[in-house]
Amino acid sequence: MKKIAFLAPSFPKLTETFIRTEIQAMQQQGHDVCVLTFAHYPHDELGYPVYKIQAPPNGWRLLISLLAKIPPLKFQSLINALVFVMQQKSLPKLSLLYYSSKIALKLSQLNIQHVHAHFAQHSCAHAITTAKLLNIPCSFVAHGHDIYNAPCDLALKLQHSDLTIAVCQDMQRDLQQIYNGNIKLLHCGVDTALFSPPAPQNGSQNSATDNVKNKVSAKTLRLIFVGRLIEQKGLIYLIQALKLLPNKLSVTLDIVGDGELLNVIEGLTSDVNNVTLHGAKDNAWLVKNLCSFDALIAPFCQASSGAMDTGPIVLKEAMAMTLAVITTDLMGCKEIVTKETGFIVPQKDSIALAHAIEALYDMPFEQRQQLGLRARQHIQTNFNAQTQAQQLSQLIRSL
């Protein structure tokens, strides 16, 4: 199995747990893995090494000295790297070559055979340059922000990467229109062993059914929102939807997350009953508490900047915990949620959101229960992290 180095702008980051999930799943597939990052955050024991990429010194003479230390470096490899460095426009050329040489030296010492980056911005540029210096293959995973909000030399990176991973069908189509290269569809997976309903009690054999039965009465609908408090999460439309609900409905909303719109959200919810703001929480909190809710509500939309969620992992995590989902028809959301597992409404449509909430509230308890059970089965079948890692492993080994 190939030894793989993962490149990430920052690691481990609370809002990017999908990277950790992928790395752990690839490790379980038998790959020797490590992580290189530009911003290294404190963390618990991960089970694999994490290296911070240190700033190299300036000057052409020191760069040449650094390049000379890379054991497998050949003239043609250097030329290939320089061609990419000179063609790209988003990063200072000397800086890109410096950092990439630093990474290449480290990876050569670790006998790395493949470089895999997340996000199509500077981490991808460094992965491509490093791979060319070492004459090994590289790949990157594209996400929403780096494709639709702040793309950088995207066509060039698609051309020079050996493998590009798109996290939803719409993204794959859009990338292929930019450059028809080796672009594969692979959704981010979820650890269904971690995100699972509580263990069965009282001798029952069905923990998922027990979990749904133990939730609050069907007369109260407990909704949870999880995500950053930013424009593309669509919280403003959700709060407007709550205000449209008939007063007779007993609906609560718990908001988990933090972000630049916190003050705005606090102001909008000041006159709305049964809304609780929890701030940002980690995976452990979600695993412990998600099952106490009836549904996740994710009114995601395209922001004015173009930013949008392309394959939200929180949808999969909630569904794996047997929650029904109310979301929008945005990008990967409509690939994750089906009419058998929840509701899909147009983005930025508060009226449609209110109707979906009311429909879920009026749904017989047993029918709501079946939505949750089918949601978990859907995730286990189509978005399991181990299944996704197996496919990624095959793609990387085939290069």
Image (cartoon, rainbow, N blue to C red):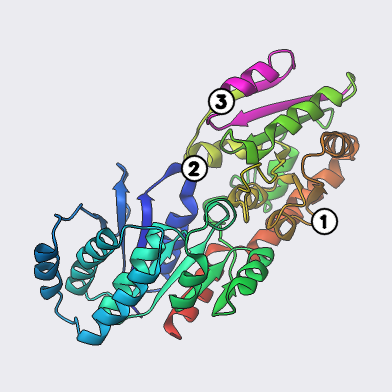
* Nearest to N terminus: mark 2 or mark 3: 3
For marks 3 and 1 on the same chain, the one whose residue lies earlier in the sequence: 3
Q: Residue at x 48, y 80 (%)?
A: 394
Question: In the image, is residue 99 above or below residue 176?
Answer: above
Kind of residue at badge 2: Asn
* Amino acid type at image mark 1: Glu
Q: Position of residue 247 (x, y in %)?
A: 88, 18
Report if residue 3 is visible in the image. no
Residue to which mark 3 is pinned: 278
Q: Circle 2 sits in a helix, a strand or a loop, which is it? A: helix
Per the model, the C-alpha gap separating discs 3 and 1 is 30 Å
Identify the residue shown where x is 86% and y is 46%: 367
Residue at 64 percent of width and 62 percent of height: 380
Disc number at residue 161? none
Disc 1: CA contacts within 10 A as few (<14), some (14-19) or many (>=20)? some
Choose mark 3 or mark 1, whichever is in front: 3
Label 2 Cα neighbours within 10 Å, binned few <14 / some 14-19 / many ≥20? some
Front residue of 290/37: it is 37
Q: Quadrant of the C terminus?
A: bottom left
Residue 365 found in image quarter: top right
Residue at 15% of width from left, 72% of height from top? Answer: 67
Span colored in magenta: 249-276
Reply yes or no: does residue 1 show up in magenta. Answer: no
Q: Is 259 a magenta residue?
A: yes
Q: Which residue is denoted by mark 1 in the rendering?
A: 340
Amino acid on which disc 3 is placed: His
- Examine the rendered structure and indicate whether residue 338 appears above or below residue 108: above
| Secondary-structure class at tag 3 | strand
- Is the residue 74 above or below the residue 363 in the image? below
What is the x, y in percent for residue 110?
A: 21, 71
The residue that disc 2 covers is 283
